[in-house]
Image (cartoon, rainbow, N blue to C red):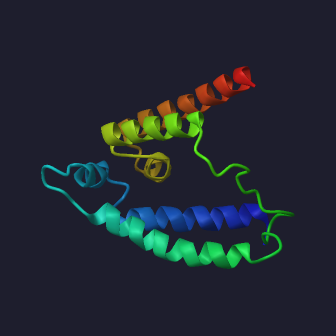
Amino acid sequence: MNKTVTALISGLLMGAGLVLSGMTSPEKVLGFLDITGSWDPTLMLVMGGAIAVNLPASWWILQRNKPVNAEQFHLPESTRPDKSLILGAALFGIGWGIAGICPGPALTSLLTGSGSIILFFLAMLAGFWLQKAVSAKSH
């Protein structure tokens, strides 16, 4: 199976999981983050399920000499958090807390045609471009 088909199937599975679990709804995410109000633990259960599947699958995959659709694994060279990782995670978390949506659900939700989702997606693309431009200038 080639990379494009594998990516398409993976993306469709991820999107279906997000829709089925309700994680494309910003209200669900914001409900999880509202620990002093009407807290909704659904997101924690979805993440726990994902981790329960991913941990053994990742271990099993990394036992192989190489991935199915690549010549080698592309793993991070450093396992220590650096300034860029911490700043990026903080910005991601702030944006997620404000909007209640992150890249995966935003991409999946584009199919709804919602103006706010389209605006979020365009802002996300602008952020990707800005990060790439800033990184290129610093290297």
Front-lying residue, 95 or 78: 78
Indicate the quadrant containing the C terminus: top left, top right, bottom left or bottom right: top right
Left or right side of 33 for 5: right
Q: Quadrant of residue 68?
A: bottom right
Q: Residue furthest top?
A: 137
Residue farthest toward the front in the current orientation of the protein: 80
Quadrant of the rendered structure where residue 63 is? bottom right
Q: Which quadrant: the N terminus?
A: bottom right
Q: Residue 97's spot in the image, x, y percent?
A: 33, 41
Residue positioned 56% across, 40% down in the render: 85
Q: Position of residue 110 (x, y in %)?
A: 46, 47
| Image x and y of residue 7, in percent | 67, 62
Q: Residue at x 78, y 62 (%)?
A: 73
Which is more toward the observer, 90 or 25? 90
**Outermost residue toward the right in this view:** 71
Look at the image and tell me whether residue 20 can be seen: no
Q: Nearer the viewer, residue 111 or 31?
A: 31
For residue 58, side relative to residue 48 (left or right): right
Q: Is residue 87 visible?
A: yes
Q: Residue at 38% of width from left, 42% of height from top?
A: 96
Q: How many marks?
A: 0
As displayed, is residue 84 above or below residue 73? above
Horizontal side, residue 44 vs residue 78: left or right: left
Furthest-left residue in view? 37
**Residue at x 32%, y 37% (from the top left corner):** 98
Q: Position of residue 4 (x, y in %)?
A: 74, 61
* Residue 100, above or below 19: above
